[in-house]
Amino acid sequence: MTELLIDKDNTFVKTFEKLLKNEGPFSNWELFKLTYQSELTRMVPSFQGLHALDYLPHMQFLPHQIKTATTAIEQMNGRVILADEVGLGKTIEAGLILKEYMIRNLVKKVLILVPASLVNQWVKELNEKFFIPAIAFRKNMHWEQYDIIVSSLDLAKRSPHQEMIQQIDYDFLLVDEAHKLKNHRTKNYSFIRSVHKKYCLLLTATPIQNNLLEIFNLVSILKPGHLGDYDSFMKRFGKDRQLLAKDQYLKKLVQQVMIRNTRKETSLNNINRQIHTIWLDFSKEQLACYQTIQQLKDLPTFSKITFLREFCSSREACYMSLKKLLSSVQNNEQIEKIITTIEQLPQHVKAEKVVELIKSLGNEKVIIFTEYRASQYFLQHFLHEHGISSVPFRGGFKASKKDWMRQIFENQAQVLIATEAGGEGINLQFCHHLVNYDLPWNPMKLEQRIGRIHRFGQQHPVHVYNFAIRHTIEEHMMKLLYEKINLFEKVIGELDDILADLNIQDFESEIKNIFAESSSEGEIKIKLNNLTAIINQEQIERNHKEAYHENY
Amino acid sequence: MKITDLHQFLVTFFQAHQCKLIVNQPGLLKIQLTKEMDKALMNRPFYWHYIERMGQEGEPMQLTLMTDTKQKHENAEWIHFGSPRLQQIMNYLKKTSKYTKLFQVVDTKVNTPLYPWLVINLKITYAGKQQKEEIFSIGLNLVNGMMVEDMMAKLDRLALQQSISDYCYPISPIIKLASGFQRIEKVFDQYIKQQDHHWAEETRITLE
């Protein structure tokens, strides 16, 4: 029989006696009752279940996230490798687990180690989504000073921080991108092992990149000895990662400490995404104007490309930029001529088309994305003229204003006209129609746009309408790039991984260079073809890897 | 007695602290705080420190809270069971409204005795690898030693106030406060002992 240790509040009666002697101060009956009610309300009535859910009504958790958090707490005692595929919400799962432990008063002292570039994002998400008062570690701060600190692993492992951290007993340690710990000979690894911790979450999307030993190492952080000691493990399994698929015993052991959700198991892929490419033709005058811009001399190639793209979006966007250019270079007859031409051009083909499209959808909500502020202003005005209500949305809006605009869109306006993907956490799932009024040259941006409405929790098929004008730069992008890499069919998060693996950091400038440095249409074609080939090859290789992961 | 109507809970809280409700409509509350409430809730100790040093009155802030998100109002703070604001209010209650001494309101023209009761609201926390809590409300009659369960719910039906009603007089307790508390404590020691403690056993095994 386990000896029970009972801790009692011994000061209670003494304080009460003193108060009685002094005749107060006492609470009145109403406030006293409220106190009792609030304690009843926030009591944790059972060992099981996630009470955090009651505390986070603004969050919509997905079934696999709730299940993961429950399993991690109830069956794995909070020492877990969270190895979901990218985009399934590991951060959300980790936040939910931490919140539950905090509500149950099991965790107070927390250390969260993440890549330097993600520190602020973690702080923000924990505070805003989970009301967890985390702060980022700053110079001259002390590690004991705050209960919940987010820091980069690289900083924490350095002296003198390392030594200070090792002095502290942490209730909860989290390491994001934990595949950095797979090698037991590194400083990262020995540092994490040396931290005193009760609960420990290791987050990684790629748990088994090279060999079994890596798993052995990660598991050893959580449960030393769970897979035996190093020598006997090596003797039995060697370095062959295929063994994990074959050896049932090993598989079971690993499953006790690791949770991995895959996109296939979760339901996102089942929701239909329908892509409609809407091809439009410039009128004769418009095309002529486009070609004049194309043939402009003495302009930096990059700005010429920008003018062309703007012209495909709206007269206004191009007009504004040209005006601006004119104010910096004097006496440019060419430009002045184009400006006069634009002033006289008839209505842009896209504007008429978008009104037609919105009207054909009845009362359905529509999001229109454009790259250009001028197009946004123009569209708002143009839609208004056609009796369609709309609200603008920009990255520069404050969070409260974004939310306000979102509310108006949800409750009153039919159309939201946005110049950027709207940022994290803006939930637009009540909308099922999205218009790409012009195409960004960064496929990640395009993904983020679609991701606003095509995400977990979306119940309806999502329609994406891509506007593109034939015989222009837009046709190249559409046909040679986006359609070839099947961009529109890809799952959110997938492309991100592919580009990261290929080390392509700035896709947009990559494309701009292709257009700027090619001397002919043919050259552009070949170069874009090469780019798509690389991306597609990488994709095939990834699929092989995925297939392997699912087999173990 | 759990909180079911958060709006009402807040109204009671702020009114009991003498705050004026500027707006009080379903789902939305706008409150003019008092100095005490501003100090308790608005996290601006330096302001009050400065104001008091200067010998000025200071200007308590207003607080707009919405309990229903459909009541979207600019600058309104959404308050719900997990929001830091509600936790702050609950912590404040726990700190400031832990003890009370009350008399039953009796409308009478004849001499009426009031019996002394000790009421203890007590929380037990079972802390193992997981955690569970229980709350009890026990009343002890300090004259005859009778013990009653679920005392708060019973008291909720009575009218109580901080001063004694006319014509009423309190009977001196026979059981002293400290020994009354001990009696209640003993009951709980017994109760805890009788529980099934396999949760503790499980925790011990996990730790090993």
Image (cartoon, grey):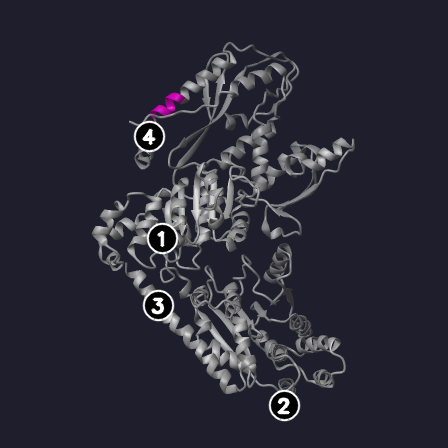
Relative vertical location of residue A282 with respect to residue A1 in this rendering, above or below? below
**Mark drawn on residue B47:** none
Residue stretch rendered in magenta on the structure: B189-194
Front one among A454 and A443:
A443
Q: Mark 1 lies on which chain?
A: A
Q: Mark 3 lies on which chain?
A: A
* The stretch drawn in magenta includes residue B166: no
Furthest residue toward front: A159
Q: Nearer the viewer, mark 3 or mark 1?
A: 1
Q: Distance between the residues labelled 2 and 4?
A: 85 Å
Q: Mark 2 points at which residue?
A: A284
* Same chain letter for marks 2 and 1: yes
Residue A171 shown left or right of residue A449 in the figure: left
Mark earlier in primary sequence (2, 3): 2
Q: Which element carries disc 4, helix, strand or loop? A: loop
- Across and down, in percent, residue B152 comes to 51, 27
Residue at (44, 19) in percent of width and height:
B185
* The stretch drawn in magenta includes residue B192: yes
Q: Mark 1 points at which residue?
A: A182
